[in-house]
Amino acid sequence: MVENLTPILTTFVIYLIGMMVLGLIAYRMTDTLSDYVLGGRRLGAGVAALSAGASDMSSWLLLGLPGALYLSGLVESWIAIGLAVGAVINWMLVAGRLRAYTEVANDSITLPDFFENRFNDTSRSLRIVSALALLVFFTFYTSSGLVGGAVLFESTFGIDQQLALYIGALIIIGYTFLGGFLAVSWTDFVQGILMFLALIIIPIWAIMELGGIGPTFDQVRAVDPQNLELFGGVGAIGIISLLGWGLGYFGQPHIIVRFMSIKSMKELPKAQGIGITWVILSMTGAVMTGLVGIAYFADAPLDNHETVFLMFTQALFHPVIAGILLAAVLAAIMSTIDSQLLVSSSALAEDIYKGFIRKNADQKELVLVGRLGVLTIAVIALILAQDPDSTVLELVSYAWAGLGATFGPVVVFSLFWKRMTRGGALAGLISGALTVWIWVTFLQTDAGFFSLYELVVGFVVSSIMIVVFSLLSKPPEKAVLDTFEKARAMAKGKE
């Protein structure tokens, strides 16, 4: 717990009031369901790119990843390498195609909506399966953010973890409930800047205090020579598992919805440049924070490795600066939870309520259902987050794998393989989700082949099922093929 709490608490309060104000402003600009879940496709390049990064990384970037490096050394950076590569590919290959295709395919505003329109699925099976999978895995993901928030409040203010959970949840639910996608994107833009600055400043400042990069790495090596070994103590299966995190990017609805919301294809190159730069530099900062923490806290090792970033803010800076940097952690947590709540609520409103319960519901009714969905998912996530043994990295790992294996292959194949069919998409969705669950529940071990990260296994199985069932199905009808060609031409700038 920090000794001088007043400046830090003041900073927190100002920051949180600012987020709520943004939510209220966005509330006045939200009239339709498209406004609420996609911002009416009017995001500029900077807001789209930074909000995608912020909603992507969450507390994992400031708590989970630095904690993993602090605990195990450089070998854990394989996760960061895999994610950086995945993020770059996602921006370069998926963003443009998805932005074009969702507009061409009957102006799809959610991922389940896109799947149904992409394959002209009159049975609606793609919509319901993808919406249900999305709700299940996002509930776990939201829980990880709430646990991260509890760690922050508990370590900083000495607040009981249960009370901290409720405080954090109340704030995030507030502005997401009110402002929807615009509130989430604007707040994520601010939060993305905060996170970026925090991850650049902290390792540089700490290295300066330790006498430079050479003495810092000497101290890291002195604690344990394995700390600077990239291949230390990990075999091929371990490296594949860590790199495999990058596969998850293609199936994260809260990230790729930012691609769908960019206001025009002309904004895309600028968004790509900003998004890729943000990811690479932020990831590098998180890796360095964990490594430098080994040297900085060598004489007094931390009880909880996931607090290394938090301890740095308190050890290095004046309480006012520390308050700003700690607000960056809260920003990371909030930026992901709000996006996940919004995608989940859009699945309830657009894909389940409008799709199956009230097909003729008007826009105000759908927005209300979306807001009630935010409350429902948040309550369930709060219940899951009560487990005191839950860590940020464990919860994120499972949710990231579930979403990545369920949606990732279907998104990639649907954008790039003309011959893909509804049957292939459905087989991919179901097999990806089931493989992750079966692998984790019944097959996974601590060593050998069965220690492979469930995302890698699920992604491969889903991809195989997509190809097999598509080839066994009748070829797509002409209207579906024509839409595919129209989307491809638009993505290439020919329309």
Image: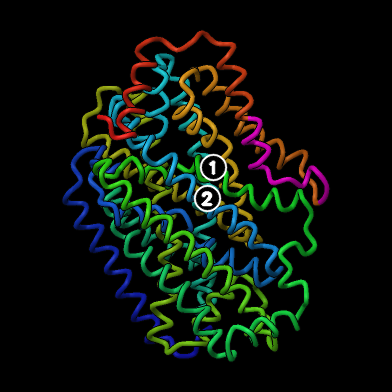
Direction left: furthest residue: 28
The image shows residue 455 at horizontal and vertical percentages of 63, 42
Amino acid type of the residue that numbered disc 1 sits on in the rendered structure: Phe
Tell me which segment is drawn in magenta. Answer: 447-461
Q: Eyeballing the image, is 192 above or below 209?
A: above
Question: What percent of the width, then of the height, locates residue 132?
Answer: 49, 32
Task: For marks 2 and 1, give the CA distance.
Answer: 6 Å
Task: Name the residue rendered at 54%, 61% in the picture.
Answer: 60
Asked whether 104 or 60 is in front, the reply is 104
Most foreground residue, 44 or 136:
44
Q: Residue at 46%, 50% (x, y): give it.
A: 379
Q: Position of residue 382 (x, y in %)?
A: 50, 54
Image quadrant holding the C terminus, namely top left
Looking at this view, name the residue that lies furthest to the right: 448
Asked whether the viewer can see residue 8, the reply is yes
The residue sitting at 34% across, 43% down in the picture is 372
On screen, residue 458 versus residue 150, left or right, reads right
Residue type for callout 2: Tyr
Vertical position of residue 3 compared to residue 119: above or below:
below
SS at mark 1? helix
Could you say where residue 25 lies in the image, as x and y percent from the top left? 19, 57
Residue 275 is marked as none
Label 2, secondary structure: give it.
Answer: helix
Which residue is tagged 1? 137
From where the camera sits, is residue 348 visible?
A: no
- For label 2, the residue is 141
Q: Residues within 10 Å of mark 1 (few under 14, many from 20)?
A: many
Residue 477 part of the magenta-drawn span: no
Q: Kindly report the secondary structure that dominates the magenta region of the rendered protein.
A: helix
Q: How many marks?
A: 2
Q: Is there CB contact under 8 Å for labels 2 and 1?
A: yes
